[in-house]
Amino acid sequence: QPYYPVYLFAPYKLAAVTAGCAISFFWAIFPYPITAKSKVRKLLGRSLFVLAKFYSAMHTNIELWMSDELGDIQNPQSPSFKLQGARHELFQEEMQLLNSLRVHSHFTTFEPAIGGKFPKQVYDNIILEIQRILTNMSLMAHTTQNLKTLSFESQGGNSMSEDDKWISQQI
């Protein structure tokens, strides 16, 4: 093996060490590890936030229905029209988030357990409960959208028979 003097070999060694440090700096700092587990956590938080916004829109809709201030759904200026648009948008976003949550939750089974076991069953139960709550709230909002006010004051007194009251409740 030939011997090279320091003044010839040192620049090559310095260049190799500098390149190695630059490459290790890039791969250690810039790429952020994105795993299915971290996506499930972030999507679950986003899903709960959207569910809370959907609850707020649904609750406002029921309050307006109970106070008979909903207005005509065909009128773009009525609260009913605006709430329906907001509810549909939030419902669509929540359904997309639930699908993403299910997919990423399924992918967590294939990732190695670094730092401890991921509580997949707990997250799956939370996703299932979000689905149930969303279904119940959308059913309540849809029901209030299609019902008429059932107050006796707006009917003009107690002149309705029991059958008429029951039928008006079913409409």
Image (cartoon, rainbow, N blue to C red):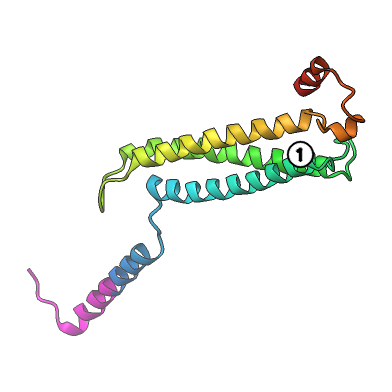
Mark 1: which amino acid?
Gln
Q: Residue at x 40, y 59 (%)?
A: 31
Secondary structure mostly seen in magenta is: helix
Q: Which residue is mark 1?
A: 84
Give above or below for 99 relative to 21.
Answer: above
Q: Residue 36, percent across and down?
A: 40, 45
Picture quarter with the C terminus: top right
In the picture, measured across the screen, residue 146 lies left or right of residue 33, that is: right
Q: Residue furthest top?
A: 163
Q: Residue 122, percent across and down?
A: 37, 41
Q: Residue at x 19, y 78 (%)?
A: 9
In the picture, measured across the screen, residue 8 lies left or right of residue 118, that is: left
Q: Residue at x 35, y 40 (%)?
A: 120
Q: Secondary structure at mark 1?
A: helix
Give above or below for 164 relative to 120.
Answer: above
Q: Residue 22, percent across and down?
A: 34, 70
Q: Residues within 10 Å of mark 1 (few under 14, many from 20)?
A: some
Q: Disc count in the image?
A: 1
Task: Specify start and end residues of the magenta stretch as a single range.
Answer: 1-17
Give above or below for 156 relative to 126.
Answer: above
Q: Residue 62, percent across and down?
A: 73, 40
